[in-house]
Amino acid sequence: MTAKPRPLVAGNWKMNGLKAALGEIEAMARGCDAALRARVDLLICPPATLAGAAVGAAGGLIAIGGQDCHPKAAGAHTGDVSADMLKDLGAAYVIVGHSERRADHGETSALVRAKAQAGLRAGLVAIICVGETEGERKAGRTLEIVGAQLRDSLPEGASATQVVIAYEPVWAIGTGLTPTAADVAQVHAFIRAQLGQAMGAQGAGVRILYGGSVKPSNAVELMGVANVDGALVGGASLTATDFLGVAAAYR
Ligand code: PGA
């Protein structure tokens, strides 16, 4: 049997954070002692404008990632950021296929897969987001939607340490609502089984994060669910107090 994956608590700052917010990353680095770091990997994905400075602020104690990347390494794509550029700044991860990008920018799973592949080519770990809308859940289509997104977004030939899956029900993001532990367990077990089919033995080692209204007060329960290997945290990742409060679920 493959060992349980090492947990990851990842913060997604979205379009938040001016230079002054780097102080929060410094406070996170000060606050994550060796005992915590022995148990869990910590990651902050600030806006691309702060990524380079964030690497310095994190002091090597917290990994830094991007929130998106272009599928190409370079070229005539005004306003876009490539995975190679993120890697060059010292980033280690890139989020791809977040539901806000799927919705705001019409990103398809085929594009998400191309972005994940670009991340892998650049030497980044790709965090691939999947999740159903409220309407899809009410219609009983959660596993169908998550299964299709996963099948079509996962790059072929990836190893367990190159990809992370984030299950984020769209209706739970930024709303304060969360699925029940039983619902999370069902979707994560389904994702684990799909990863096994797609990746063979590697599938057991892929980290599957839960995301959507994770905060210090619900982290222990959510992180305790089977096949939950960490969290993707939005609002509660913006301050060191809340982010470390979520990570403390692994103490
Ligand atoms: P939230 O966002 O924690 O603010 O709900 C999660 C996410 O979108 O990654």
Image (spheres, rainbow, N blue to C red):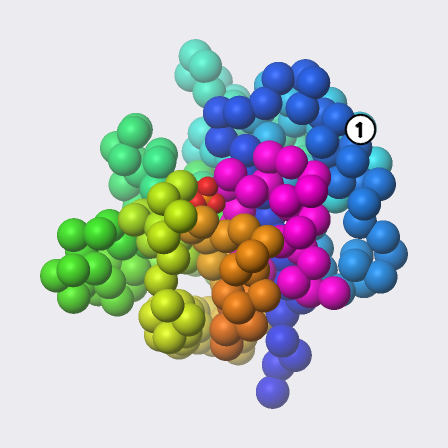
User: Does residue 249 show up?
Assistant: yes
Q: Is residue 238 above or below residue 188?
A: above
> Is residue 118 or residue 12 the one in the foreground?
12
Q: Residue 3, relative to residue 221: is it above or below? A: below
Q: Eyeballing the image, is 99 above or below 39? A: above
Quarter of the figure with the N terminus: bottom right
Q: Residue at x 18, y 56 (%)?
A: 136
Image position, residue 189 (x, y; %): 41, 75
Residue drawn at 30 percent across, 49 percent down: 171
Question: Picture coordinates of residue 108 (x, y %)?
Answer: 27, 41
Q: Amino acid at mark 1?
A: Gly
Q: Which residue is mark 1?
A: 56
Q: Which residues are magenta?
A: 230-251
Name the dominant secondary structure of the magenta segment.
helix
Give the x, y percent position of residue 227: 50, 73
Q: Quarter of the image containing the C terminus?
A: bottom right
Q: Quadrant of ligand 1?
A: top left
